[in-house]
Image (spheres, rainbow, N blue to C red):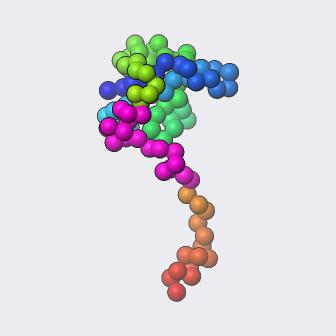
Amino acid sequence: MLYLDRPAVLWRGRLWSHLISDVSYAELHAFAEALGAPRRGFDRDHYDLPAERFRMAVWLGAHVVPSRDLVRLLRDAGLRRPKHLHLPHPPHDRARSVRELD
């Protein structure tokens, strides 16, 4: 099932919602594509959705829930990807990897 919170986050002069799935990322991506949301709006485990797309998301079947429920739903589904656990990988250190082989 798909869920979103009401647009309440102000960023770059616009209000934003968060769109999630409690089934799979595949379901989330398919819904976002049907909604016309660009893939760049995906952030680890949710889509940042501008307020202009809110009504269409609800019309397509997303359920509106309070913001605090989104994390719980993701966690319960095993789909939560917290920012602190998903840091960018450090650059590959070729010299170090060669030394480790010696």
97 left or right, relative to 68: right
- Quarter of the image for residue 8 reads top right
- Quarter of the image for residue 79 reads top left
Question: What segment is highlighted magenta in the picture?
Answer: 71-88
Residue 23: image x %, image y %? 31, 34
Q: Residue at x 62, y 23 (%)?
A: 10
69 left or right, relative to 36: left
Residue 32: image x %, image y %? 45, 27
Image height check: is 39 above or below 6? below
* Whether residue 37 is visible: no
Residue 45: image x %, image y %? 45, 38
77 left or right, relative to 54: left
Q: Residue at x 60, y 70 (%)?
A: 93
* Closer-to-camera residue (59/44): 44
Residue 102: image x %, image y %? 52, 86
* Closer-to-camera residue (77/2): 77
Q: Residue at x 49, y 18 (%)?
A: 6
In this view, the residue farthest toward the right is 13
Asked if the magenta segment contains residue 85, the reply would be yes
In this view, the residue farthest toward the bottom is 102
